[in-house]
Structure formats: C-alpha cells, structure tokens
Image: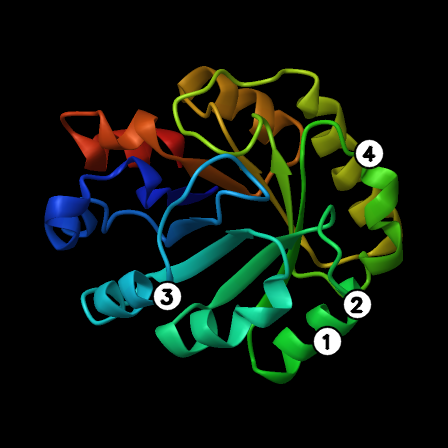
Amino acid sequence: MIIAPSILSADFSILKDEINTIQEAQWIHIDVMDGHFVPNLTIGPDVVKSIRKHTKQVFDTHLMIEDPEKYVDAFIDAGSDHITFHIETSAKHEALIDYLHEKGIKAGLSIKPNTDVEVLKPYFHKLDIILVMSVEPGFGGQAFMEPMVEKMKELSLLRKANDYHYKIVVDGGINEKTAKLCKDAGVDVLVAGSYIFKAKDRVQVIRSLK
C-alpha cells in the first residue's frame, strides 16, 4: 500500500519540519483548492516549489480548482510528479491528460462522492491515477463515506477485466479501520491527513497503514 500524507493537515508555519516527520511515506499529497470549485482556499505553486528542495518524495498534486489547464504548467514547474484534476470541471479532459503525459507527468482524474464511475470510462485507458473522494472535498478531518467502497470495487474489477494500469487512490476519512476497507476493495494508495499529522508517532502510523 502506498501512503500519501496530505499536507493540508500539516502545520504550515513549520512545513519543512512537518515534511521531515513523514519521510516514511512514499508520496506527499498536495491539495490545491481555489475557493470556487470547493469551499476552501489552500496553497499555490510557490509553496510546492519551496518544499520540493527538501524531499525526494513523489509530489502527488490534486487540483480541486476550476480551469485546471490554466495552472498545470505552474505546478509542473514547481516540482509536481503527478497531477490529478476533477472530471466535474469544464476542462477538456482528454486533451489535458495528453498534455500532462507529453510533459512527463502522471495524469489522474478525481470524482466527488456524488459522481458516478461511469463518467470516467472514456479515459480509463489513458489514466495513471483515479482518485475517489470518500468525503466531500474542501476540508480535512471529515468522516469516511462507506458507500464509496463500492466505487473502489468497481474500479478494481474494471481494471482487472480490461488490463488498465491506473492506480486507485482514496482521499478522505482514512484511518486504520477505513484503510482495511479500502485495501479489501482493491485500492493502491491511501491519502491521509489528520490521521497522520495528529499522531504523536507519525512513522508508526504510516507503517501501520502500509
């Protein structure tokens, strides 16, 4: 299991030190929100650039923003390795996936809890990542929505049946209990924010999730 701590839950006044405490994780998940697509404002590419020099971990950038195509270059230049954007935006999804691949970036699509897996089907063969939101995007610390497990199972079955290569990522309400539900559903990557950053021993928590 790949673990991707979400720095949305970190203490931004000591962000470099916070990142040093999660080196046990393979990825770092970076939530970018614009206050329009979701009801919160978070970080921009300058913050991503400032922390890139402090770690070699994979930067898994999640754009919860309108018009993602206008901003992907800034996040690529800042050091993102993956960029996931939302199917619910008005972006030209296939063109943006192709553009990210041309730039050597892993491309992902995400769906909100009320969005059906069906809308992703035209893009399955091109995607590196499918991110299932198991909470309503916008704020950390929310409770896991168990009905989302069925989406994870469906994505896992479709991948196996069609030999797709996307990784299934889950974001929201992850803890030791919900992590097991996700694993059993075929998930590859767990995004966890408050569960990791509120822990006294973050290394142990990350290891337990792995």
* 74 versus 134 height, above or below: below
Instruction: Report, in whole angstroms, how far the alpha carbon at label 1 lies from the one at label 2.
Output: 6 Å
Residue 78 falls in which quadrant of the image?
bottom left
Name which residue type carries label 4. Asp
Return the residue at label 3: 45
Instruction: Report, in whole angstroms, how far the alpha carbon at label 4 lies from the one at label 1.
Output: 23 Å
Return the residue at label 4: 116
The spot of residue 32 in percent (x, y) is 45, 51
Q: Of the residues under marks 3 and 4, which one precedes in the sequence?
A: 3
Q: Of the residues under marks 4 and 1, which one precedes in the sequence?
A: 1
Residue 192 falls in which quadrant of the image?
top left
Name which residue type carries label 3. Pro
- Determine which of the numbered discs, if any, sits on residue 98 in the image: 1
Name which residue type carries label 1. Asp
- Residue at 37% x, 60% y: name it: 44
Q: Is residue 60 left or right of residue 122?
A: left
Observer-nearest of 185 and 54:
54
